[in-house]
Image: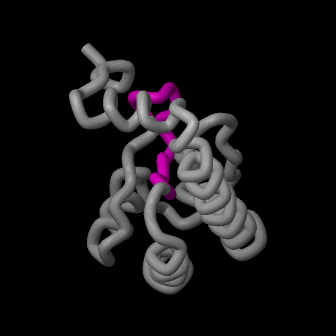
Amino acid sequence: MSHYNSMNVLSMHALIGAYKDEGHKWVDELCMVLSKNVNYAYEIISRDIEGVEVSKPEGTYMLFLHCEEYCKAHGISIDELIQRGWDVGVAWQQGAPFHDPWGIRMNLALPYSLVAEAMERVKKYVFL
């Protein structure tokens, strides 16, 4: 059973706080940070990494990379590509549970400086 639609106590209180009057400013700022992160990562991948199709999220902070063309062109499996990321500190998810056996999900809900660092690692060490 998927846990993605389940809520824990902390996320429940965060959601309640976000919808209160005093939470609006925080949510607006969070949305700006997430948008900046998504736009930056999307631009880097779509501009600098051949063979990877990237999709901007609609309503979340997870970037989705479709890597079939890249993997086939470089003779590697999606598992090998994912492991390259993990080996250099880029934590991402296999896309198969989300209906894409050649996919990778990248979580961008973190400080911009870490997104920039991760994208440099991705360009330098993962997509060779």
| Location of the N terminus (image quadrant) | top left
Q: Is residue 22 shown in magenta?
A: no
Looking at the image, residue 34 sits to the left or right of residue 43; the answer is left
Tell me where residue 5 appears, x and y as whole percent. 38, 20
Residue at the spot x=42%, y=28% of the render?
16
Q: Which residue is farthest front?
A: 21
Tell me where residue 80 appears, x and y as whole percent. 35, 60
Quarter of the view holding residue 110: bottom left
Residue at the spot x=48%, y=53% of the render?
106
Observer-nearest of 3 and 49: 3
Visible in this render: residue 54? yes
Looking at the image, residue 103 sits to the left or right of residue 5; the answer is right
Residue at the spot x=61%, y=57% of the render?
29
Q: Is residue 102 shown in magenta?
A: yes
Looking at the picture, does residue 128 appear above or below residue 45?
below
Magenta segment? 96-108
Visible in this render: residue 128? no
Residue at the spot x=71%, y=62% of the render?
39
